[in-house]
Image (cartoon, rainbow, N blue to C red):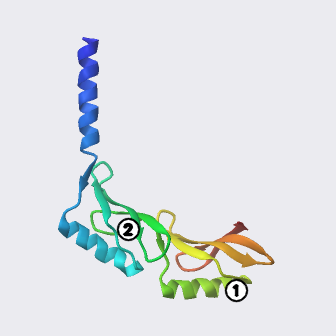
């Protein structure tokens, strides 16, 4: 009886694992790429995770050396992951950093916590990581 139960449990588990992700349709793929194009990104590796009810993008190409992972809900809104900043956001980040007496750095937006993270910022002769709200208000500065 234990052997049958173990075999059944393994069968159920393997079936659930197989159903965890599915390929996206051509329409879903196009719609997702139209959303992330606003940030200069394009994705080829996209799956729909049935367990989380989300689209998962692995290694979106955003025109630079960096690759970004993102998750979108079924309304095609980005809800998790990170993305590069737009040119306008970069200008607003630079203005916020200038108010702090800082400059430079590499910035990205963190969707899960809804803030901008700027690494390698020059302040007071040192290098720091700075976090700004999505409204470009200061949150935190820590040594990088």
Residue furthest to the right: 125
Q: Residue at x 29, y 70 (%)?
A: 32
Marked residue nearer the N-terminal end (2 or 1): 2
Write down the residue under mark 1: 99
In which quadrant will I find the C terminus? bottom right
Residue furthest to the top: 1
Q: Is residue 12 visible?
A: yes
Q: Residue at x 31, y 66 (%)?
A: 44
Q: Residue at x 26, y 18 (%)?
A: 5
Name the side, left or right, on which 26 lies relative to 79: left
Q: Is residue 80 visible?
A: no
Q: The residue tagged with tag 1: helix, strand or loop?
A: helix
Write down the residue under mark 2: 78
**Residue 85 against residue 24 in the figure, above or below:** below
Q: Which mark is residue 65?
A: none
Q: Position of residue 53 (x, y in %)?
A: 29, 54
Q: Position of residue 107 (x, y in %)?
A: 57, 75
Q: Residue at x 45, y 66 (%)?
A: 68
Q: The residue tagged with tag 2: helix, strand or loop?
A: strand
**Residue 9 against residue 34 in the figure, above or below:** above
The part of the image, by quadrant, that contains residue 98 is bottom right
Gap between marks 2 and 1, in whole Å? Answer: 30 Å
Name the side, left or right, on which 13 lies relative to 84: left
**93 or 67, which is in the foreground?**
67
Residue furthest to the front: 65
**29 or 142, which is in the foreground?**
29
């Amino acid at each position: 009886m234990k052997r049958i139960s173990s075999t059944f449990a393994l069968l159920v588990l393997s079936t659930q694992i197989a159903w965890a992700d599915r390929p996206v349709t051509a329409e879903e793929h196009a719609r997702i790429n139209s959303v992330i194009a606003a940030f200069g990104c394009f994705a080829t590796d996209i799956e729909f995770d049935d367990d989380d009810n989300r689209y998962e993008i692995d290694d979106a190409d955003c025109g630079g050396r960096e690759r970004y992972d993102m998750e979108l809900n079924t309304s095609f809104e980005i809800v998790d992951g990170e993305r590069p900043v737009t040119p306008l956001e970069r200008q607003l980040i630079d203005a916020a950093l200038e108010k702090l007496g800082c400059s430079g750095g590499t910035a990205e937006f963190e969707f899960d916590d809804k803030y901008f993270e700027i690494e390698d910022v020059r302040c007071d002769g040192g290098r720091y990581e700075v976090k700004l709200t999505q409204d470009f208000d200061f949150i935190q500065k820590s040594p990088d």
